[in-house]
Amino acid sequence: MWRHIASNALTFLVVLVFLFGGVLIWAQNEYVSEGPLEQAICVQVDRGTNFRNVSEDLAADGAVSSAALLRIGADYAGKTSQLKAGSFLVPEGASMEQIVDIVTRGGASTCGTEVVYRVSIARATVQVRELDPATGRFVEIAEFNPAEDEVPEVYTSVKTEADTRYRVALAEGVTSWQIVQELNQIDILEGEIAEIPAEGSLAPDSYEISPGSSRAELLARMESAQERILAEAWANRQDGLPYESPEEALVMASIIEKETGTPDERFLVSSVFVNRLEQGMRLQTDPTVIYGITRGQGVLGRGIRQSELRAETPWNTYVIDGLPPTPIANPGRASIEAALNPDDTDFIFFVAKTLDPADGHNFAVTLAEHNANVAAYRALEAQREN
């Protein structure tokens, strides 16, 4: 009898082991397999919460099939104590393993609300945007000019939320004076700016910031980024260019930046100016005249007078030979690369095709061709005035 009982107990134990093993295999497969989420969602992890609350929220949102299994898997991976506060995008079909990694790996929030401080040539704006998880695109909630408009309530509200992200976005071609002016208007930044950085030394780009960030440190990041871009482009430049230093190339890049807003034309415009330098011709470019008038402190806002074309300033390339002594703006990477890798052309003239700058320019080799292009442009101006 005892032998029979022992045999049954052993059988039961074997079955139990197999069942337990099967459950483990199922649980492991469930943890790493594609999840039930049919559409991406934004999951908010509040500061001070625990993994139980997060797992139950995820189960309620349909992101996981079992809150308990999610917690067990996270605990086995040693990640239940590594929750990071913020708002995180959980993609469609994310596995439990992927979700645990998303809410524990840290870094900036990947969804939710974003405030973008845009510094452009003509004006500065503040945008409040919300990420739509379904499309992965930001939807604008509010936009205002801090110097002119009343601050919307939504901006004041989102600044109190811990997971709001902030960026400063610089447009190509803004001047250092403009950048400093606008950084001083950003109310979440702190500290004084001792002096305006050298023209051309700041890289137009997008920079993550946070409440309490230092204005001076942000400028230092912009300067370091521009130094890296210029050094890399200089190391990969064409042979035989008429520049004696990277700084001269930066001056040329700033002129290219201000002359064309059409990306495909930068290398053509560069070729014109390089050809003119090599032939001993003056550059004769209007943006250098404007910089001599404004010193980069705002937009001219009117046409250039004939007297200004003849005025002697350090930057007026209708008067001076060669390049100006400093850049006339902060050029972006593309213009720097164009200055150091111009197209191989014989062009030495160009003029706008139409009254819309987005339409680009007509390029010419001879003065006769150029005069014909200018005449066509003047005709368009006359039509507009009539």
Image: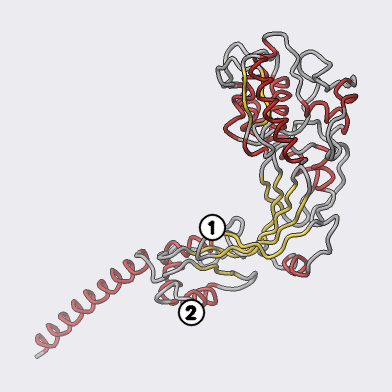
Residue 310: give x, y in percent of width and height: 88, 20
Describe residue 285's horizontal placement relative to residue 81 as left or right.
right
Q: Quadrant of residue 341?
A: top right
Task: Spot the residue most to the bottom.
Answer: 1
Residue 76 point in image, percent of width and height: 42, 66
Residue at the spot x=73%, y=22% of the render? 247
C-alpha distance separating marks 1 and 2: 22 Å
- Tell me the quarter of the picture where residue 30 sits: bottom left
Q: Which mark is residue 60?
A: 2
Which is nearer the eye, 73 or 133? 133
Circle nearer the N terminus (1, 2): 2
CA neighbours of label 2 inside 10 A, class few (<14), some (14 to 19), many (20+): few
The mark lying in front, picked from 1 and 2, is 2
In-front residue for pair 74/162: 162
Q: Residue at x 67, y 10 (%)?
A: 278
Which numbered tag is attached to residue 105?
Answer: 1
Q: Which residue is painted at 60% across and 24% down in the image?
A: 268
Which quadrant of the view contains residue 359? top right
Identity, as a three-letter code, of the amino acid under mark 1:
Arg
